Image (tube, coloured by chain):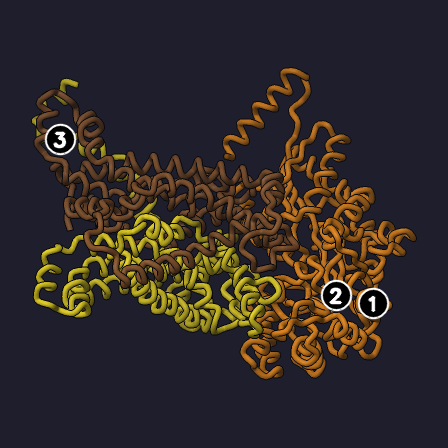
Amino acid sequence: MNALRNWAMAAAASAAALFAGAANAVEIEYWQYFFDARVAAMEQLIENFEAANPDITVTMTHFPYADYRTKVAAAIPAGEGPDVVQLFYGWLNDYVEAELIQPLPTDAFPPSMIEEEFFPMVQAMKRGDAYMALPTAVRSLALFYNERLFDEAGIDGPPETLDELVEIAKKLTKRDAAGNITQVGITAGMNAQDHHWWREVLVRQFGGDPYMDDYRTVNYNSDAGFKALEFYLGLARDHGVTAFGFMDEPQAAFKAGRAGMHIDGSFRIGSLNKTRGLKWGVTELPAGPDGTRSNYSSYWVNGITTKATGEKYDAAVKFMAYVTSDEAMQIWLDVVGELPAKPSVGMTEANANDEVFGPFIRGLAYANTTKFANESGQRQILMDMVQRVDIEGQPLGASLDEAAVAEQALLDEYYN
Amino acid sequence: MTATDIRASSETLLTVEAPKKAANMGQVVRWLILFLGGIVMIMPIVYMLSTSLKWPHEVYNVNLWPKEPTIENYTFVLEDGRFYGWMINSTVIALITTASNLFFDSLVGYTLCKFRFPGRYIVFIAILSTLMIPTEMLVIPWYLMSQQFGWLDSYWGIMFPGLMTAFGTFLMKQFFETVPDDFIEAARIDGLNELQIWWTVAMPLVRPALAALAIFVFLGNWTAFIWPLIVTNSVEMYTLPVGLSSFGDEADVQWELIMTGAAISTIPTLVFFLVFQRFIIRGVVMAGLKG
Amino acid sequence: MGFYKNLSIRQKQIVWAWAFLALPVVFYVVIRFYPTGNAVLISFQDWNLLGDRTWAGAENYLKLWHDPVFWKVFRNTFAYLIIGTPVSLVISFVIAYHLDKLRFMHGFLRMLYFLPFMTSAVAMAWVWRWFYQPVPIGLFNNFLAAVGIPQIEFLRSTTNALPAILAPAVWAGLGFQVIIFMAGLRAIPKSYYEAARIDGVPWWTVLFEITIPLLKPTIVFIVVFSSIGFLRIFDHVFNMTTNDPGGPLNSTKPLVLMIYQSAFTDFDMGYAAAQTVVLFLILLLVSLLQLRILRDR
């Protein structure tokens, strides 16, 4: 296939040279994971970029999220794969250490300018004097709610606090004659975004700090962590307003109109908009018992791989500059629903007061960014923590401690 | 068990003897129970098909027949084009692999069966011993090999491990035993060379075995999952099972669409079976009993 | 050409044989034997695909020995085998035994049982996964709810999930085994039954004294064949538990899934290779053991 592709490209290039007499177009490859809206947005960006730079062609390849990391890690050392690659902020260390990506040139991307213009969390991408990668967009969490179900249950508006959340959820829950839940008040599932909610939001709202030492030491095995877990599991066990595994996936339940509320990221907006017959609203995550607000933010960055050299490198730099431009950020916001990585673009009057984007953008102000060593591994640990209690009936405290030990072991192995 | 026995039993399986005695009560009960059991067996397939014809709002009803059948799901799933590509990939890969197996497995089986040459026994034992090595043990080296030679994400990469199989070689060797040596001798005297003898004399005599092998290799490659999952990168290169798996796993996919995807990847083999039922049953018996 | 003409018939045969075998021999060496050796070699190395390969000695095997997840996976793998093989053997025998005695619409009945064998494991895993969902979407639980019985957690349970995943695997394989059994039954000479009938021997005696003993080669084949299949189960588990592969709490994870994850999620190639060596040894032992027990009884 590759040979074929190369051949086709060579053929296309020579044909172009023959007919137009133009210099050979530089072709660079861009990789990202598959998510409808992201692919659509990137197609639009590539189109704009190619229009402005007729001598550069960008081909995009995308993979399912589950395989993405594998594919990237395997392809670049083999001399295949992308010139510009999108990666999760938490993977940067791995990529830098393995020499998969190269620093951005400081003349085109001066660190002082980046520090002035981008959200401060982006500074985690700096190594030495240069930035390794930059995001187009950042994301945060918010509470989606089904307006039709709210009206039906006679609820005026979304919850402001965790207590209100529980009360409202109770009104939204429905059961059948056999006692099975057929509609949940709020979705629950650590496999989706709830692990972020628990780790960065609930633990802090109950007075704790999930990690210490720059996310190298687990600290949620505390009183606060216990209360946070008690609250989270209580939604299903004490209040009966949710069921784990309901409709297989939380967002599926919300999209099907079988869930009153749902915590998810800004990237969900696009696909919710496409769901026919779903009338939804969104609001900031509810405040904790003492009024504390917190949120989790994360971002995907683009970087230039070590594979790009010569004219491909120059083309890649131009492309990087475009995808981190204000224009690209606005397109990304409009198409994907992810928030611009520069406050100057994101915090415009129009964006911050936007009915849909507003809650996410306001959430960014008090958001925390987990520095993952291995996101899926750390998520699995929290998932198992909940399942041990929920399925196997392990006491809450014991499960919490077990999770903390497991995650600490994972962190130790990574950092040492 | 020799090949002749296998032939005998596979033939008897297909001949239906007329019932001599009148159906008694016991036979009727037996028939009814087996019939109900058979209906239960195909229920998952039936539900898959019926759900693929339902509108989303009806999906969670347990009724078997859709109230308002629709092909909307098929239009929707096929519209995005990926399924066509996956089906083409699967078909091409299964066909090429099948052809390769038919050619090489029978060539090797024939050589090991009909030639006397130094090293014959060693080659035979060596090929046979690969039956004991699970594919899973080889996927990591294959993956590294593919990475090194740039075979990742290509048809060749998906196909190369299955181009020849020890199973097929052994099966064909067993069946060439049934070809009388006299035929081959006669052909030699007629001045045919060895390649011609194999192709024009021996091969036509083992057609049923070739059919059996073809069915198994094709089906095996059509449904193969773990290796294509590992070796493919881009969505365009997926085979049907890998594509279906990622389609099902895409966030927000609905069950009626997943059932439609499952139906799309199952219907071809079901039709294939209904058309070639006799061959397939006989093939199963022949391939199954060689062991 | 002159050289070839001077060869004796026997020598010509040797030339032909090796000409025919040349490409296949290369194939088997490069695609089968070399990778086997390579897998064993990697199992003694430490390699994450990105960095250097370093010699690790028996470290990977020791890590495996001390990994609680491995032992859980080990138990699961054998649970698939120990439940799956006898269940599918008995069911398929019972079906074949009775189907063999029927003539009316015989081909149609046989088709019903055989159809699942023609399906792809991935497609059917998703179908069954849907069946198993809790209310309001799962078919099974909707049936239960319709008659007022509380729902059963099939996949979200550490006890029910493994049998629930095994069921479609058994289901899909039944048709194949039924056909093999029927062929085996037909191969038993009619005269044995005639003799038994004349002697007035009851049917169960015929079954246990004639039919089953004479079916032994068939049973050996089915047991070995299906055991290897169950020990290598992957497609069903992978597709039915994509949200938490091998979960909940690793209760359904078979060895092949652990290998896949070690190699292609964690990039711990050495560790994964060590697991494949263990899988190889298990398969070897189980097949040898079964052949021995079933052949010499």
The amino acid marked with disc number 3 is Gln
User: Dot 2: what SS?
Assistant: strand
Q: Are marks 2 and 1 in contact (CB under 8 Å)?
A: yes
Chain A painted colour = orange
Q: Quadrant of the C terminus of chain C?
A: bottom left
Distance of label 2 from label 3 (alpha carbons): 78 Å
Chain B painted colour = brown
Distance of label 3 from label 1 (alpha carbons): 86 Å
Q: Nearer the viewer, mark 2 or mark 3?
A: 2
Q: Quadrant of the N terminus of chain C?
A: top left
The front one of C42 and C36 is: C36
Q: Are marks 3 and 1 on the same chain?
A: no
Q: Nearer the viewer, mark 3 or mark 1?
A: 1
Question: Please, is residue A81 above or below residue A19 in the view?
Answer: below
Q: Which residue is mark 3?
A: C13
Q: Position of residue A141 (x, y in %)?
A: 75, 62
